[in-house]
Image (cartoon, rainbow, N blue to C red):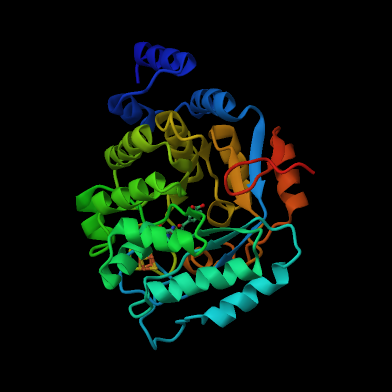
Amino acid sequence: MNDKQRQSIAGKVKRGERLSPDEGLALCDCRDLLWLSSLATCVRRKYNGNAVYYNRNFHIEPSNICVNDCVFCSYRRREGEAGSWALSADEMRALCEPYVGMPVTEVHIVGGVHPSRDIHFYTSLLSTIKRTLPQVAIKAFTAVEIDHMAKQAGLSYDDTLRLLQQHGLDAMPGGGAEIFDETVRRRICPGKTDAHTWLHIHQTAHRLGIRSNATMLFGHVETPAHRIDHLIRLRKLQDTTGGFDAFIPLKYKASNNALGAGGEISTLDVLRTVAVCRLMLDNIPHIKAYWPMLGKDVMQLALLFGADDIDGTIDDSTKIYSMAGADAHPTLTAPELETIITAAGFTPAERNTFYKTIEK
Ligand code: V47
Ligand code: SF4
């Protein structure tokens, strides 16, 4: 990037003007990490001041049995295969019991696309969890899981989401987006819900008042151009709906999956990507540094590159990253999360699912 382009980009960021795809590409190539950090920090301050958000949450992974065959996935098993699990609704209710009366504000439910579980199973699961934990927001089911439920039931996405909402669905997580580019998608997750449908399901959810997140799986076979294309498609949808609360760049973890041969990208590449996401997604308020996948140290560094949210206490309740090579027992208490945030120079803010600050 030459000096003129640097000045032009810095001026646009300071004035709050939108960056073009070409400028995004130039940023992907930028070796001046400190400059990127200062630009991304300028945007994060505009949205979030000095706050870094966290929440008290736990995960339920109903099953790792999945009809899809994503090449990057270390988690999926076929029915009956060693290492597969499928929790019954009763077992999932039992997982919620220890949180009754606790200050947890969110349960995050994501799993494989189980071949035979239908929408009635999931609506009844939502009702059971709401009855057990009425004060807790349910953030559940990626667009990929919802696509499968809708097709299997012969319902429109609108009807499917309404039904889930009526039974307690409060928000949707951002998984399943991977990389939108069709060529990359064919290579890393053939057969999975396509980009158009993923975006359409989120658009429908937003119309119904279901807020959601978006992710990008990066650091595998995609190019910088694919990343920028992904961000631009999200930015366009957000311009029309405003329904995305947070964006989560997910670093590809290479252990125990068929895409693993190329290894993992460096921490510098991760930090550069976080900054580029913050700069390009000028209409999504929060960038989440998801610590179970990044690790605690890189998560803390990401706060200096535009991230303003570190998600939650998790409570050792997720396997999708540990099976791909991340920390085997992800758990941090709220005071530990606050210490990490304070040590990086920010002000901790406990939030609920919708980024409303919880006063102590
Ligand atoms: O879509 C699978 C990713 C996602 C690997 O909305 C992998 O708050 C890295 O939805 N290396 C599901 N990533 C997780 C998800 C999520 C996670 C955190 C926060 C939120 C939120 C949502 O997990 C999948 C896929 O992109 N994934 N395998 C892997 N080997
Ligand atoms: Fe199934 Fe999700 Fe794994 Fe893909 S990433 S195989 S959809 S569990």
Q: Is residue 39 left or right of residue 335?
A: left
Residue at left offset 69%, top offset 73%: 97
Residue at left offset 45%, top offset 51%: 251
Residue 291 position, x and y percent, is: 58, 52
Please count the marks in the image. 0
Residue 75 position, x and y percent, is: 43, 71
The residue nearer to you, when weighing 159 against 114, is 159
Residue 252 appears in view = yes
Given the current orientation, which residue lies at the most extreme right position?
Answer: 360
Given the current orientation, which residue lies at the most extreme bottom position?
Answer: 80
Q: Where is 307 relative to 157, above or below? A: above
Q: Where is 105 relative to 7, above or below? A: below
Q: Is residue 232 left or right of residue 103?
A: left
Quadrant of the drawing holding the N terminus: top left
The residue nearer to you, when weighing 314 against 219, is 314
Residue 72 appears in view = no
Residue at left offset 38%, top offset 13%: 8
Residue 45 position, x and y percent, is: 59, 25
Q: Where is 321 relative to 91, above or below? A: above
Q: Is residue 183 left or right of residue 9?
A: left
Q: Where is 17 relative to 211, above or below? A: above
Q: Quadrant of residue 318?
A: bottom right
Q: Quadrant of residue 122?
A: bottom left
Q: Quadrant of residue 326?
A: bottom right
Residue 190 position, x and y percent, is: 23, 63
Residue at left offset 25%, top offset 69%: 154
Quadrant of the drawing holding the C terminus: top right
Please tell me in which quarter of the rendered image ligand 2 is found: bottom left
